[in-house]
Amino acid sequence: MVFQYLRRAAHDSPYIFTSFVVAAIGPVLVVGVPAIRKSQGYVSPARIPDTYPLPQRARNPPTGYDD
């Protein structure tokens, strides 16, 4: 019964049927892709620094720029 409806929907309105198929695949990919990447040995790259590292010394204020 369900397969007959799906076949009819694919024939009568393929654009709606295709959109439902793509929408149904999305959650499956959210769960499946990370597991597949991990099984293939993918290692996440190092995080990009959020701030610029400050030097571990006393900071000298600039001189000669009197306002």
Image (cartoon, helix red, strand yellow):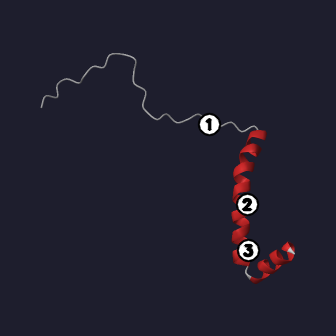
The residue labelled by disc 1 is 45
* Badge 3 element: helix
Name the amino acid type tagged 2.
Ile
The residue labelled by disc 2 is 25
Name the amino acid type tagged 1.
Pro
Q: Residue at x 84, y 73 (%)?
A: 2
Name the amino acid type tagged 3.
Phe
Report the quarter where the N terminus lies.
bottom right
The residue labelled by disc 3 is 17
Label 1–label 3 contact, CB within 8 A: no
- In the image, which is nearer the foreground, mark 1 or mark 3? 3
Rendering coords of residue 44 (x, y %) = 65, 37
Q: Earlier in the sequence, mark 1 or mark 3?
A: 3
Q: Pick the residue in front: 41 or 21.
A: 21
* Badge 1 element: loop
Displayed quadrant of residue 64: top left
